């Protein structure tokens, strides 16, 4: 009955306060004990685990199980790409869209000069444009692509070499997926099974091999695991490496800044920030010095890019303005800054200090929602953060359903415009698919913000935990607060130092009977 009571908390009114004494030491939270969807799903495997399961004690540790689970889902994704591997990438203008198995990887093998033995950032790409003469990816991703090119066979026709290049990248990205799920499981050590949301995510299977985003996802997950283990320098190093693979992990420093401001952990933030800057420079400086223009291409291309697929800016351009927005970058920067300021205010004014994973999810989601483009694989950025910020299968699956529908919608729209047969959905239906993606992401943002404002509804804190992924922030007292948090702290201070009179000035009720020995001095006179 206790497990069922806790599992229904999401469906009913907010529960009472969490346990004051905190969680029991050396215990592992089992999702089937507190999540109704996980409990129902466990019936497929014989029901919730019992006392004899010995979770974490037998050979089947959570990390091993999660690694095998993510590999199984990843392999299903490879089978989903099979129609393109054998034909769709190479024959027919729209086959890869109608079968929803598109990937950038085989096309960029020749399109970015790897098939010709060219070196990224040093050699201009074949058939480049004035805005993009060199590889348009961050340096660590370019190195990842180069290593895969070195491992690709140099014999055979171009089609077989592109197939080989995709397969090599798929194998390397599968390692990244395993690293990401294990690191996510260790970011909240009492809740390793929350990482199962990442391992079984439908969007992971569909999007894992579209591009190289899993490299940054894995590095960012390792950074969060190191921060959880109170190792801020190493956390910063991996944030820097992740930023050298994709830009979004740099946003993780923002939540750390405001949380360390609230808790006074300036030394730890400085260590993380220094580690991030140092690691990023170590990776980027050699390419900067070898060819500044080649290194700068990623940033200049991002700056000159117009409204593109998946963003609400595309809807604005196609359905309202019917032309590009000249000040697009300014609008995006303004909206992102305003969103980050709102998240920062939430961090310092919430009744209880938000968890690191909650703010990390919100700031990356804000970046995605305001960006000028939303490629389907960008959802991979949010999946491990969502697993840590809101580990509830119902909310997670609602969001994933929206992302799967968008995945199908974007390829169907490209197929519709790819040839004269118009197989697929038109512009209006594609706008609806974009709206589904936006609404699904906003829904998860809403429940995360609700958990922050009503911490008793946060599933991670129901057992008395504070911030399991917070590292040095976990259980730390507040040093700087504003807004609601400051008002509550002042009320607590007033109650502690002025108990004789309430805020209306009323006298405390007289005690009618006093037990023998209860007092040691004369009774106080009534206040005048």
Image (cartoon, helix red, strand yellow):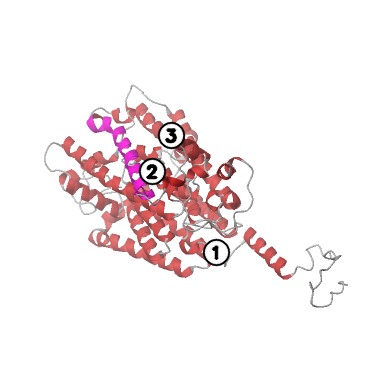
Query: Splitting the image into 4 quarters, where does residue 478 fall?
Result: bottom right
For the point 57% across and 41% down, the residue is 4
SS at mark 2? helix
From the image, state whether disc 1 or disc 2 is nearer to you.
2
The residue closer to the viewer here, 226 or 34, is 34
* Residue drawn at the location 29% of the way across and 40% of the way down: 104
Magenta span? 59-86
Identify the residue shown where x is 75% and y is 69%.
498
Q: Which of marks 1 and 2 is nearer the N terminus?
A: 2
Residue 151 x %, y %? 18, 47
Q: Mark 2 points at which residue?
A: 199
Q: In which quarter of the image is residue 236?
A: bottom left
Residue 44 disc label: 3
Q: Give SS at disc 3.
A: helix
Query: Which of the two residues, 395 or 460, is positioned nearer the viewer here?
Result: 460
Does residue 276 show up? no
Please say if the residues under marks 3 and 1 sit with CB atoms less than 8 Å apart. Answer: no
Q: Residue 140: give x, y in percent of width and height.
A: 29, 54
Q: Name the residue under label 1.
A: 262
Can residue 521 be seen in the rendering of this structure?
yes
On whether residue 80 falls in the magenta region, the answer is yes
């Amino acid at each position: 009955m206790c497990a069922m009571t806790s599992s229904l908390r999401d469906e009913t009114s907010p529960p009472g306060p969490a346990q004051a004494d905190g969680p029991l030491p050396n215990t592992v939270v089992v999702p089937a004990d507190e999540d109704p969807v996980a409990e129902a799903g466990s019936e497929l495997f014989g029901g919730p685990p019992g006392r004899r399961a010995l979770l974490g004690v037998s050979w089947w540790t959570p990390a091993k199980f999660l690694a095998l689970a993510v590999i199984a889902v990843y392999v299903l994704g490879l089978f989903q790409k099979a129609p393109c591997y054998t034909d769709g990438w190479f024959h027919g203008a729209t086959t890869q869209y109608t079968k929803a198995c598109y990937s950038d990887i085989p096309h960029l093998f020749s399109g970015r000069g790897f098939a010709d033995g060219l070196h990224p950032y040093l050699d201009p790409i074949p058939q480049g444009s004035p805005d993009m003469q060199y590889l348009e990816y961050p340096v660590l991703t370019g190195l990842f692509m180069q290593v895969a090119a070195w491992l690709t066979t140099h014999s055979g026709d171009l089609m077989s070499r592109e197939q080989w290049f995709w397969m090599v990248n798929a194998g390397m990205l599968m390692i990244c997926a395993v690293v990401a799920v294990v690191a996510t499981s260790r970011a909240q050590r009492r809740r390793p099974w929350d990482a199962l949301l990442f391992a079984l995510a439908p969007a992971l299977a569909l999007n894992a091999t579209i591009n190289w985003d899993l490299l940054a996802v894995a590095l960012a997950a390792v950074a969060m695991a190191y921060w959880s283990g109170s190792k801020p320098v190493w956390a910063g190093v991996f944030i820097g490496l992740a930023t050298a693979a994709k830009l979004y992990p740099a946003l993780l420093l923002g939540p750390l800044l405001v949380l360390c401001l609230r808790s006074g952990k300036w030394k730890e933030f400085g260590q993380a920030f220094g580690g991030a800057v140092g690691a990023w420079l170590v990776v980027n400086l050699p390419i900067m010095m070898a060819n500044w223009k080649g290194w700068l291409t990623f940033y200049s291309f991002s700056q000159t890019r117009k409204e593109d697929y998946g963003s609400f800016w595309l809807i604005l351009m196609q359905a309202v303005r019917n032309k590009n927005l000249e000040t697009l970058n300014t609008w995006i920067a303004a909206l992102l800054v305003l969103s980050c300021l709102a998240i920062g205010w939430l961090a310092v004014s919430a009744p209880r200090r938000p968890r690191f994973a909650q703010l990390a999810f919100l700031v990356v989601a804000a970046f995605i929602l305001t960006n000028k483009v939303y490629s389907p694989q960008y959802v991979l950025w949010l999946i491990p953060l969502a697993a840590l910020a809101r580990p509830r299968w119902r909310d997670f699956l609602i969001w994933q359903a929206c992302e799967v529908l968008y995945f199908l919608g974007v390829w169907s729209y490209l197929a519709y415009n790819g040839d004269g047969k118009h197989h697929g959905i038109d512009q209006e239906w594609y706008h609806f698919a974009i709206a589904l993606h936006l609404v699904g992401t906003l829904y998860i943002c809403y429940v995360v913000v609700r958990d922050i404002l009503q911490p008793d509804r946060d599933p991670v804190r129901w057992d008395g935990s504070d911030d399991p992924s917070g590292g040095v922030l976990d259980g730390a007292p507040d040093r700087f607060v504003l807004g609601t948090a400051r008002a509550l702290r002042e009320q607590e201070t007033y109650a502690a130092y002025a108990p004789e009179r309430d805020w209306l000035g009323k006298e405390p009720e007289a005690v009618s009977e006093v037990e023998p020995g209860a007092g040691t001095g004369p009774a106080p006179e009534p206040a005048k």
